[in-house]
Image (tube, coloured by chain):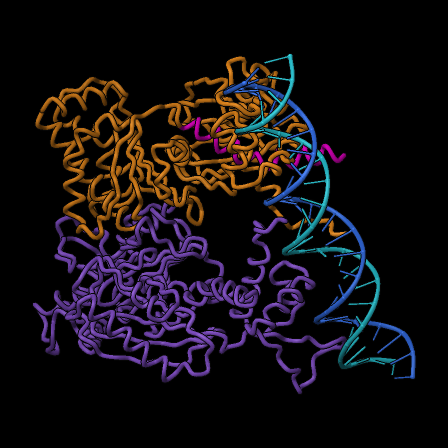
Chain colours: A orange, B purple, C cyan, D blue
Amino acid sequence: MALPSTDTSRHDNTLAVIRTLRDRGPAARVDLGTLNGISSATVTSISAELLQQGLIMERPPEAPRPNGRGRPKTLIELAPDAACVVCIKLSINEIQLVVGDFAGQVRHSEHHTVPTLTLSADDLEALLEEKISAVCTQQLEGFQRLAGICLAVQGVVSSQSGTVIWSPALSFRNAPISARLAERFHCSVLLENDANCIASVLAAQPAYADCPNLVVIMLGYGIGMSVLINGVPFLGANGSAAEFGHSKYQPDGALCACGRRGCIEAYTSDYALYRAAAENLELPSGDSAHPSEQQMQALTQLALKGNPVAKRIYAEAGRALGVGIANVLALFNPDLVLITGSGVRGFDAMQTAMHGAIDDALVAELRGTTRIESCAWDRDMTCMGGIAIALNATDSETLLESQTAREA
Amino acid sequence: MALPSTDTSRHDNTLAVIRTLRDRGPAARVDLGTLNGISSATVTSISAELLQQGLIMERPPEAPRPNGRGRPKTLIELAPDAACVVCIKLSINEIQLVVGDFAGQVRHSEHHTVPTLTLSADDLEALLEEKISAVCTQQLEGFQRLAGICLAVQGVVSSQSGTVIWSPALSFRNAPISARLAERFHCSVLLENDANCIASVLAAQPAYADCPNLVVIMLGYGIGMSVLINGVPFLGANGSAAEFGHSKYQPDGALCACGRRGCIEAYTSDYALYRAAAENLELPSGDSAHPSEQQMQALTQLALKGNPVAKRIYAEAGRALGVGIANVLALFNPDLVLITGSGVRGFDAMQTAMHGAIDDALVAELRGTTRIESCAWDRDMTCMGGIAIALNATDSETLLESQTAREA
DNA sequence: CCTATTTACTTTAGGCACTAAAATAAATAA
DNA sequence: TTATTTATTTTAGTGCCTAAAGTAAATAGG
């Protein structure tokens, strides 16, 4: 009798054990019990199952002596080769492809220069299929299976439907791009906003563990944002929440890449800064609509060294950013606003004006106790977040599959 | 052995049954099972406990014949007198006090005119204590106990700490006001933002059942907002989230009651509209900083009847509201924005400008599919929401208490 | 070297919650 | 009056978890 068990506790506890092992590395059964609030008898039972499924391994006792007396702990750890996931970051004219193992470690990474704006949705799907196939044959030999793929895309995406609604890296719109890959590789394909990937990585860092409500703003060619509410990315009704870059600084203000006026992005993004500067300054030549890192570095240096025109441009960018952040503080009241992205290079030149704008905009009671900090930029962060998200998403499936396989 | 059961399913299912009965009225055990996805055997078991605790009653079979054959359903319903809750709405110069029974019905309501701005925190606590005491002796005879109190306050409140951080109705700040009441009446005292109460009521209405992400904007003397994410009010890190009224329309714009410039409230609230009008129009006299309903009605009528000055003022208010809503759409991407509050009286005069501003601010992809609607204002809505919130919060406690009482 | 102590892990025994199926209850239809 | 239908209750059985008891594997100290 009583076939379908409605009690999810075993499943939940098993997931908790796997995630603890992934987040904290090898651990003993006692400690897994303590960390997750379950008895070690239960951990024994869970780990026996996982061991049998090949998802975890017992680590051989270390040569160096254990500390203290008593029976030494037997550490268990995730079997890195039990599965792997692939994260593909799609940005303007570049794709990055990273392979992560079941333990969450990056095992392979590659970059390709691709004229993304010239691709049709079909082209893109074909390209991704080809790149993943290549990686599969070259890199995935030791792995039991490819468990999931995460596409990290700039812009507005609908995770549920796997549809890219709008991306600055792509010229097409409203295209479902994950279904074909899911069919081809027989695994789940997640579509994520790039900022959400980064926020997930940052939120997992111990330094920000006390900030369940976290806003991450990414400065760069465009302006992205991710909002974590109680640690989970907030997506809104159809995935286009947290479009900070297109919230307003000045109605009828500067022209934005989106086609409207007065967006924060139209003041604070790379292209906006460079556009404002190009009119008045001698700058390294190049495509001024898509300034290079070198060009932006040069401009930032001018501002930091005191060039009055550059200083003025960065101050205005800081004011726009500040007004935008003031709105975010009023509406979200997060614990922490973290500013990162390649554009943090210019943060020092904006900072004073930004804080000034925030203080002008909000009285203390509304300003609250939110910390506002910047954070060094690492271009690999997006894919690391994508790997983590993909693994989290596939854990459940992995368990189910090993289970059904075992029963059959 | 195994004393502390970690399985919360019994508790969860019991709560689900109680809430179903409260939301939908009397129901049969079979239906409670179907609605909550549990077997009717379990409902039998749960209802036996609740019956014994006196929290529900079996309704005597109806005289009119049941439809169809088979054993007729035995309806069970909440025992209305098992407990009651009190909601107190605190607004400028007025407090409203409402008593609700365990079934969620309003059993008593009263209004008092009180010079709220002259009160100290102590005065307020004393006043509330007195009013609740009076109601207790006069109205609460039939009830077994007062299970909870909800204070619905305009402004920024911290629900967790029971602290009023800032309210336009009060001259003091950062005062904890719930502890004394909790001690005096031996029940939990919730402090809630008034807009959250209203949003909870609206979200429970069948018409908005398909909108888990709902934004409610309240126009009136000030501008309030509540954001429901997956049906639960979003509070932010310390309760001052959703301060829409003080998000920005124009940096360095019109002066706001908060002391800063350019807030949406400084254009769209009653006092802002009246202030703008007072300079150019003949208006009914009175306290122009706190215009009365009559004064506002008169002003609205002028605009609707085509007076060019009044029309211009409402159009500007609509533009400010529209830019604010555009930011909300970009950042929250809700399913629905509902505009209500006493200020909806002027919504028709703002609407065109508001939609124009939204369309100017956001391209279609960012505008999304969010519906924007207005909703008639009912001054009792706040307290009805407070009653519902207080009951939801006290269900758990009620169960625990009857349980421990039974064991002792 | 042997024994006591300490700590980790496993096994055992028992409780709780849930479900399916069987039993019972209470009506209508024929 | 009996068969049928539907609701509720009882019974029997399963899964999951925990505490306690049992076992394993080390150190500390004679």
Q: Please, is residue B141 above or below residue A99 in the view? A: below
Q: Is B159 located above or below residue A126 in the figure?
A: below
| Residue B3: image location, x then y, percent | 59, 51
Vertical comparison of A344 with B227: above or below: above
Which residues make up the magenta segment? A382-408
Give the residue at x 28% y 49%: B360
Q: Main secondary structure of the magenta part?
A: helix
State yes or no: residue A399 in magenta.
yes
Residue B20 shows in the view: no
Q: In the figure, B278 relative to A367: above or below?
A: below
Specify whether residue B345 is in view: yes
From the viewer's perspective, tell me whether residue A11 is left or right of residue B167. Answer: right
Q: Nearer the viewer, residue B114 or A65?
A: A65
Q: Position of residue B213 (x, y in %)?
A: 42, 54
Q: Dividing the picture into quarters, in which one does residue B278 lie? A: bottom left
Q: Which residue is painted at 51% across and 69% down in the image?
A: B23
Looking at this view, is A347 or A295 the one in front? Answer: A347
Residue A375 place in picture, x, y as percent:
29, 29
Look at the image and say whether residue B179 sits in the magenta stretch. Answer: no
Q: Residue furthest bottom?
A: B63
The residue located at (59%, 23%) in the rendering is A79
The x, y position of residue A325, in whole percent, is 25, 43
Q: Is residue B83 left or right of residue A351?
A: right
From the viewer's side, name the closer residue of A47 and A306.
A47
Query: Which image quarter is the C terminus of chain A in?
Result: top right
Name the residue nearer the viewer: A274 or A202: A202
Q: To which quarter of the image does residue A202 belong?
A: top left
From the viewer's perspective, tell me whether residue B309 is left or right of residue A203: left
Q: How many marks?
A: 0
